[in-house]
Amino acid sequence: MSKLIMTVDDSASIRQMVGFTLRNAGYEVIEAKDGKDAVSKLSGPIKMVITDLNMPNMDGIELIRQIRANPAYKFIPVVMLTTESQATRKQEGKAAGATGWIVKPFQPEQLLAVVKKVLG
Amino acid sequence: MQEYMALAREVRERLGRVGSGLAQLVQRREDDFLALGAELQDVAMRVQDIAADSQQLNRIASGDTVRHILEELVSELDAMQTLCHVDDDAEDLAMLARARELVHELSRSIRDYARVVRTLQMLGISTRIESARLGSDGRGFSTLADDVEKLGYKIVEYSDRITQQAKTLDSLAEKAEASTREMREMQRECAYSVFGSLRENMDTLHEVAEGSRKASEDVRGHTADIAASMGRIIGSLQFHDIVRQQVEHVEEALTDARACLEGAPVNVPANAPEDAAADEAMAVELAVAADICALQEAQLENARVSFSDAVSTLRRELTAIAASVRGVGQRTGGFTDEACHVEDCGGTAVLDRMERSVTEIATRMLSLAEQGERMGNVMVEVAEMVAQMSVFLEDIEDVGDEIELIALNASIRAAHTGDKGKALGVLASSIQRLSQDAGESTMALATLLREVDGVAGQLKSYATAYLDSSRVSEISGELEGLTRGLREVNGEAAQLFARVGSACTELAARVDHVVRGLDFDAQVAAGLSDAAGDMGEMAASLRERVPASARAVASRRLAAMRDRYTMEQERVLHGRVLGGGHAAQDAAVSVDESGDGYGDNVELF
């Protein structure tokens, strides 16, 4: 049975590319347009979250905090996918509970390698 | 003061105009990127379908089914060639020739027998004359004369029968020879013409199978190329978001610059008093605006290059995908051959030809079997007739025995008659000599007839072989099965070939169409270029008009701006334009320091 992954980004084209890459590799994908939307959709067998950092309504760091506060998803991998590459922001993400950090643009094989790694 | 105030107003207004145009320049292209993304997903699905069909087709051409058919054909061919074997020794023909030789020798021997008959007739007459001369003493000799005459008649009768039979046999053997030669010609034609053609087709099929294996590798290569292109396209499509963010950051910077210049009053009276401090402050704000403009010129130029590169990559990789798709189409259809490429015969010419060859061979084999049956019947007739001739052997041997008895009888009677029978004694001696001569001729005939009997047996065995069409029927059935198998494979292959061909043509044309429609980058690039030009002009103009002291202060203020960037590239540009040493970090960030092999843009915590 394929695993369900949530992709969160305010850019529809990024959500499309992440979804395309993951679906092609056999994963199921649920999309959210920002952190707030993601929190509202956080239910069911979601095994991983791939989120942008800078988004309206709720950013990626806050989303990670909310996810970690939810007992059902406390331990699921959350990988940041962002244009942000500053070490301080990475540190902030790590402190909030991020599993990894990917700077855009990603290559499909990179994303899939990371997904495979963090999902075991 | 008035000069700086007026300049500030002019710059603020101009920054406002540039900023308002930038906002939608990239953002409104999201639909284009989304449409491209959707197109890409559809292309990827179609490529997967095409690759699967193509590999299936190549599997058919080089796979188990064709391999099985080939093995079966090789084995059937061996069996068929054994059946159609043209024996250079031509034993059956040699045997028929020998039969005819024997018949001719028999005819000659029969002619020798005629001499015995004539002697017997003479002896019969002489015995009858001598018997009459002796009167009552020679009465017993008339019986002897009767016996001699009867024997002569018997020999004549046997000779006639043998001669007649020999003539018929010779004619039959001649017919059998002709049939054998005809059969041999059919076998030769079958072996060299049809089998040759089938072997040629099998060789082609072998080549096709090998070609298909290579084609499979090529298709895998093309599919890998397409996947790699897809990866690069996915990377490029993300540049809408990246460039949009870059432009948003430019907008934010322009807003900041405008805010710095907000202090400039809209209407400054011409006679307003000079305020040195305010003047200096405004000069610094204008210097800051100049630096911001210079910075945004670089950022916009970088955004333009990134956007153009991304769309160029899209164009290039989509073109590469179309070429690879065409490559898949060209490398599919393992059953095609050179002639087929020229004649456009639907990609299954080899199988069509093979099916025709196998059907033709089956027909030829049945025709051979029928001819064999006819041959067998003639051989049986020949063999039976030859066998009948061996019956004459007994008669001939009886003749020899009878002559001997007559000679013995004549000698005894002559002895009984005493001196009067001296002449008869001479006759008895002649009969005895004749007995010896006849014995020799009989022996020669018997030898010939025994050999004829042997030939009959041999010819019968050939006839049995010719008449046995069970193996031919068996092979014909197996060939029919193979033809059916070929037809099924051919049908499946033709269907797949047509599907892959039309799918590749359609998809490549569609991708080409997408590439031709990819022109929005020109408008975006022009907009970014115009904005960058405006920024550059403003920066240059402002720097000319503000004092160096103000510019030094401005540089220090803008150093803090660097921390607001999200992208490394933005920070690098900032460093390059305004100094600060960040450009040196440019090379450092391209190294994958994590060592985890995911790439320099990936870090797992």
Image (cartoon, helix red, strand yellow):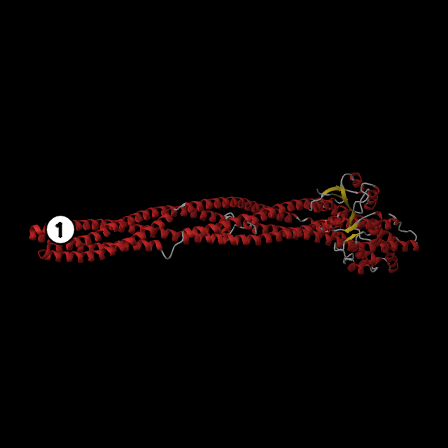
Left or right: B512, with B240 as reference point: left
Q: Amino acid at mark 1?
A: Ala
Q: Nearer the viewer, residue B19 or B343?
A: B343
Horizontal and vertical percent position of residue A98:
81, 48
Horizontal and vertical percent position of residue B118:
15, 54
Residue B118 visible (yes or no): no
Place residue B546 in its image quadrant: bottom right
Name the quarter where the N terminus of chain B is drawn. Answer: bottom right
Residue that badge 1 annotates: B145
Q: Residues within 10 Å of mark 1 (few under 14, many from 20)?
A: many
Q: Nearer the viewer, residue B161 or A20?
A: B161
Horizontal and vertical percent position of residue B49:
61, 45
Horizontal and vertical percent position of residue B306:
73, 53
Q: Nearer the viewer, residue B230 or A70?
A: A70
Left or right: B239, with B195 as reference point: right
Left or right: B149, with B368 as reference point: left
Residue B448 visible (yes or no): yes
Number of callouts: 1
Q: Secondary structure at mark 1?
A: helix
Left or right: B434, with A31 as reference point: left
Provide the chain ID for the residue under circle 1.
B
Q: Nearer the viewer, residue A108 or B445?
A: B445
